[in-house]
Amino acid sequence: MKTRYFCTVLFLSFGIIKAQTAFSSDPLNAVFETKDTDRFWKAFDKIEKSGQNPFTDYIKDGSPGVKGFIEFRIINADSLYSKVKKRREDYLKSRNVLAGINQKEKKTRAVYSALKYWYPEAKFPPVYFVYGRFNSGGTVSGDGIIIGTEMLNNLDGVVPLIAHELIHFQQNNKGKENLLKHSLTEGIADFVSELISGENINTKAFLYGETHSDELCREFVSRLRGDDQTDWLYETSKKDDRPNDLGYWMGYKISEAYFRKQPDKHKAIHELLNIQDPLLLLKESGFLDQYIREYAKKNHTEFDDFFKN
């Protein structure tokens, strides 16, 4: 993750949110909503004057973005009020961070148009900029992409972040819920978002992955059928110096290999966004063949048997 963009800890929910039929299919009509930030600062400026919690109205009158940020993040008006009083100066650092959002919006629409080229059936959810309690850089809900504005130091990484989340809205993946599927879900979001934006937000994981590719590929082959995501997605056991989210790197490498092998690139993008069988996609990518053959030999099985569900 780009630590200059968010704080050093960035909590994002990367679950698949199926595209809503109400979302625009035209990149130029996609919504970028910043009114919640105006409501937040209006409430913020009342802290010293009001004897009541000024954030009650911020939540009551908030957009679907605020509503989607309540569970596990804002919690309620009292929780937000308490946090703002404790970290008043930290909140103030982001007061003008959206000053250049219009230029980022233009760039984001260009990214949306690139996705429309690659995936004509794409839907474009609203992007909501809201304020929370310094516990989430952003998330996705059925209503759109939600960015925790208080976490922004600047807008350097906001476009590739939105691009990554945009891909999750398009995904419709099938298959067993295991490490392979979840790594593909995240890695494909990184791969396609990089294709349309030219940027990748997981540089730390990617650098480590490329440097330790051999041992990581061998480990992943031995674990990809299981549902334990430790050391690959979201958290590590601290057994070594690996960063979080190496599954993003692995999923990216598999999807990149698959994409390169397909003669019809548009069809390849459609298949990556609508996985029917993760193991078959892995096989067709050829990316881990060397390690799968090694694993099969060690376990006295056949190469093709590895890909059977």
Image (spheres, rainbow, N blue to C red):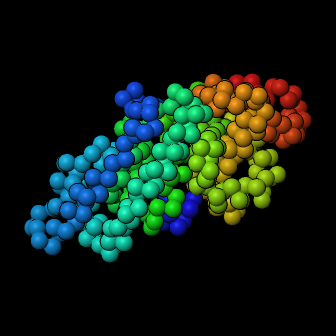
**Percent coordinates x, y for residue 124 in the rendering:** 44, 36
Q: In this view, does 231 lie to the left or right of 216?
A: left
**Percent coordinates x, y for residue 265 in the rendering:** 70, 31
Furthest residue in direction bottom, as rendered: 89
Residue under the point 36% across and 53% down: 129
Furthest residue in direction left, as rendered: 51
Q: Is residue 223 visible?
A: no
Q: In which quarter of the image is residue 176?
A: top right
Residue 161 or 113: which is nearer the viewer?
113
Residue 206 or 225: which is nearer the viewer?
206
Up the image or down, 279 lies above or below 179; here it is: above
Up the image or down, 305 lies above or below 155; here it is: above
Residue under the point 58% across and 48% down: 197
- The total number of labels drawn is 0
Up the image or down, 90 lies above or below 295; here it is: below
Q: Is residue 46 left or right of residue 114?
A: left
Q: Is residue 243 left or right of residue 263?
A: left
Q: Quadrant of the N terminus?
A: bottom right
Residue under the point 56% across and 62% down: 2
Q: Quadrant of the C terminus?
A: top right
Q: Is residue 26 visible?
A: yes
Residue under the point 23% across and 57% down: 39
**Percent coordinates x, y for residue 226 in the rendering:** 66, 38
Up the image or down, 284 lies above or below 206; here it is: above
**Percent coordinates x, y for residue 9 in the rendering:** 50, 63
Residue 26 or 176: which is nearer the viewer?
26
